Image: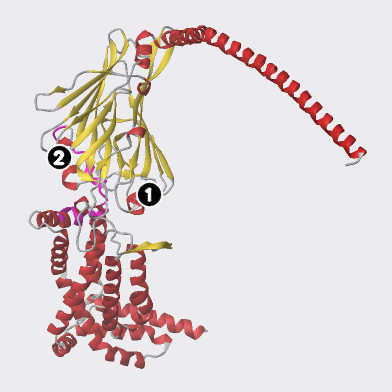
């Protein structure tokens, strides 16, 4: 190793040792600084620990002062009694009878929920459904708003802002349970709510909740006003299988005093509202099979009603609102109201009343149809249906027997319709001869006159095939309204359908087809096929007798069954099942009549009738008709000659 290398190594060693020494000094200095900083932080923490209780006490004291100031302002604005009711702790409790459980809250002294014990929400076959809840308790609101005097000022009081004092539930003289809740206003003045839960084993009474409002010594406390406002609102759950069908029947209904019919806001998939400036007897938040009804025997003087529709799949159907007013004078001591929370069952709603002879016509909540259609349902279909279900447990068999009975009732009309079509078919060659005899357009009147004369001699009514069908229409439309509205079919299974009041689904599609849906209803499909078979067979019978029917083949035979399939796919399976049975029975009935009717006998009858008519004198009506035909023919010829 040479001299230069040794010197280089020595220099590097000196530099390394110097760096190590300096780094050690810096580390010691850093440790000392960290120790001083930690000591400073510890001193701050200790100081904070000592002063924290004092600061907390200061904040608490400040809050107490603020709360006292707020309470002082409330007492000044409302009075000591109402201010105390505003700050009280609310309680909830439940009162039950055999058919329902009613939940109350002392906050507002209101009903916050009703559970119907005899009815379940829809659940697939094999699963247990939950009991029907009439409303979502979190959305239930029923409040009365009025003005009271406080010195020289008037204070508006909304009962929803105050906690009522509840008395223990008492038993009435007839076994009813009485709930009394009282809102003290000032001194001995108070607003008293008295609810009555009946237990009489009569459904029309037990679904009622009596609601008496008493203004106890309130006249001197009430400000100058002519009405008291009532705000009622809640949200209804989805209780049925199909949202679309349930939403179609869910709306707000109301009745004018003295009227037998009811009014509705109608169907909407969004929002709808209406302001009613005249008196109303009751207002109903109506679902497909259940209703919450506010009844005012002395009528409300004004109502602003509305609803908004929930999103499908949310578990809700509609948000209902009703803002109403009742008249008030200093002499008013109270109001006798009532609620109905129960099923839309005809036999129950028909009997609901608050006093003897007081007919509320609440059965009109069930959409049985207007005019003759409702009459057919109320006086024919419902009595027969109720009679059959008392003896037959299967509603599928009940519908079958009902379909057979209806076909038997209208069988004379079916027979006359077939005979009329047979006559038209047999006389068609003679009608064709008249068409050849009068081929010109100007001879149309002569051809028509000769055709009518031919029909008259043969004893044929040209409308004979249509009139029986028109007579059947009220029955067909009546059952169309009856089955989707019949709560008796709810939760009743038959064959593959798990609920005859809703659609049956044998196949759920992973997509939705416009105008059809996301499922396949087998009853609707079979009904459409039976309609195609019946329409095709009926067309074969009528087309030969009435050539003008040939142009309607596509509409009658093909288009109509397809339209019915699209329409009925989401309708009640009980209705599709009934129409399927009706079509099959009609086809069978027509085949039997065809075997019974002998064309040769009909031909002989028409010939005998023609011979008899040819010997007789023409009636005055026929003479006038022929004279009218001649005049029209002359006018037609004159018009053609000018051309």
Could you tell me residue 431's position as x and y percent?
29, 88
Q: Residue at x 15, y 39 (%)?
A: 203
What secondary structure is marked by label 2?
helix
Q: Is residue 389 above or below residue 591?
A: above
Judge the density around disc 1: few (<14), some (14-19), many (≥20) Cα neighbours within 10 Å. Answer: some
- Residue at 38% in and 84% down: 444
Q: Residue furthest front?
A: 1
Residue 323: x %, y % from top left: 38, 32
Quarter of the image where the N terminus is located: top right
66 left or right, relative to 202: right
Q: CA distance from mark 1 to mark 2?
A: 29 Å
Query: Which quadrant holds residue 450?
Result: bottom left
Q: Is residue 375 above or below residue 406?
A: above
Is residue 624 something one can see in this rendering? no
Front residue of 544 and 555: 555
Residue underneath mark 1: 267
The stretch of residues the image draws in magenta is 355-379
> Image quarter for residue 592?
bottom left
Reading the chain from its start, which is encountered first: label 1 or label 2?
A: 2
Question: Quick one: label 2, few (<14), some, or many (20+) residues within 10 Å?
Answer: some
Is residue 230 shown above or below 508? above
Report whether residue 342 is seen.
Answer: yes
Q: Is residue 375 above or below residue 542?
A: above
Q: Please state the horizontal and vertical placement of residue 263, each as a whole percent of the image.
A: 32, 44
Please give the residue where the numbered disc 2 appears in the rendered image: 203
Instruction: List x then y, in percent, for residue 498.
Output: 23, 57
């Amino acid at each position: 190793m040479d001299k230069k290398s040794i010197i280089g190594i020595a220099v590097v060693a000196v530099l390394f040792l110097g760096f190590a020494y300096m780094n050690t000094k810096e580390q010691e200095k850093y440790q000392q600084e960290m120790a001083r900083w930690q000591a400073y932080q510890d001193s701050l923490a200790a100081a904070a620990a000592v002063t924290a209780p004092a600061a907390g006490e200061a904040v608490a004291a400040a809050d107490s002062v603020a709360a006292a100031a707020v309470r002082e302002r409330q007492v000044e604005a409302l009075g000591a009694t109402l201010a105390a009711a505003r700050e009280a702790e609310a309680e909830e409790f439940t009162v039950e009878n055999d058919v329902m459980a009613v939940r109350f809250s002392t906050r507002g002294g209101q009903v916050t929920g009703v559970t119907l014990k005899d009815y379940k929400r829809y659940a697939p076959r094999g699963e247990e459904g939950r009991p029907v809840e009439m409303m979502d308790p979190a959305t239930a609101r029923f409040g009365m708003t009025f003005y009271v005097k406080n010195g020289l000022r008037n204070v508006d009081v909304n009962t929803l802002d105050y906690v009522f004092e509840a008395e223990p539930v008492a038993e009435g003289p007839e076994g009813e349970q009485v709930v009394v809740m009282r809102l003290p206003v000032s001194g001995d003045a108070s607003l008293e709510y008295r609810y009555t839960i009946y237990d009489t084993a009569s459904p029309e009474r037990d679904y009622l909740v009596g609601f008496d409002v008493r203004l106890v010594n309130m006249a001197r406390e009430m400000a100058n006003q002519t009405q008291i406002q009532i705000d009622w609102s809640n949200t209804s759950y989805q209780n049925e299988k199909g949202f679309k069908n349930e939403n179609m029947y869910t709306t707000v209904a109301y009745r004018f005093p003295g009227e037998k019919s009811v009014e509705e806001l109608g169907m909407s998939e969004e929002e709808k509202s209406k302001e009613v400036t005249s008196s109303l007897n009751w207002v109903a938040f109506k679902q497909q099979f259940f209703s919450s009804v506010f009844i005012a025997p002395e009528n409300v003087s004004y109502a602003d009603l509305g609803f908004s529709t929930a999103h499908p799949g949310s578990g809700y159907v509609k948000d209902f609102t009703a803002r109403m007013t009742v008249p008030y004078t200093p002499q008013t001591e109270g109001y006798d109201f009532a609620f109905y929370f129960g099923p839309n069952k005809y036999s129950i709603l028909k009997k609901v009343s608050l006093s003897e002879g007081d007919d509320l016509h609440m059965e009109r909540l069930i959409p049985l149809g207007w005019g003759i259609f409702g009459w057919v349902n109320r006086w024919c279909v419902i009595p027969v249906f109720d009679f059959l279900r008392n003896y037959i447990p299967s509603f599928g068999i009940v519908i079958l027997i009902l379909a057979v009975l209806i076909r038997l009732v209208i069988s004379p009309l079916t027979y006359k319709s077939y005979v009329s079509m047979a006559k038209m078919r047999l006389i068609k060659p003679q009608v064709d001869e008249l068409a050849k005899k009068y081929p010109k357009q100007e001879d149309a009147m002569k051809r028509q006159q000769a055709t009518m004369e031919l029909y008259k001699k043969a004893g044929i009514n040209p409308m004979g095939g249509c009139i029986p069908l028109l007579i059947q229409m009220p029955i067909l439309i009546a059952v169309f309204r009856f089955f989707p509205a019949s709560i008796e079919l709810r939760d009743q299974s038959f064959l593959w359908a798990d609920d005859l009041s809703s659609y049956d689904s044998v196949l759920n599609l992973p997509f939705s087809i416009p105008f059809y849906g996301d499922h396949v209803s087998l009853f609707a499909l079979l009904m459409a096929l039976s309609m195609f078979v019946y329409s095709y067979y009926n067309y074969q019978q009528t087309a030969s007798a009435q050539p003008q029917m040939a142009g309607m083949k596509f509409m009658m035979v093909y288009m109509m069954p397809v339209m019915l399939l699209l329409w009925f796919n989401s309708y009640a399976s009980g209705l599709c099942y009934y129409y399927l049975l009706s079509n099959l029975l009609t086809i069978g009935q027509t085949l039997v009549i065809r075997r019974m009717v002998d064309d040769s006998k009909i031909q002989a009858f028409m010939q005998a009738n023609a011979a008899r008519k040819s010997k007789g004198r023409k009636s005055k009506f026929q003479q006038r008709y022929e004279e009218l035909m001649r005049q029209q023919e002359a006018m037609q010829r004159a018009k053609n000659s000018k051309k």
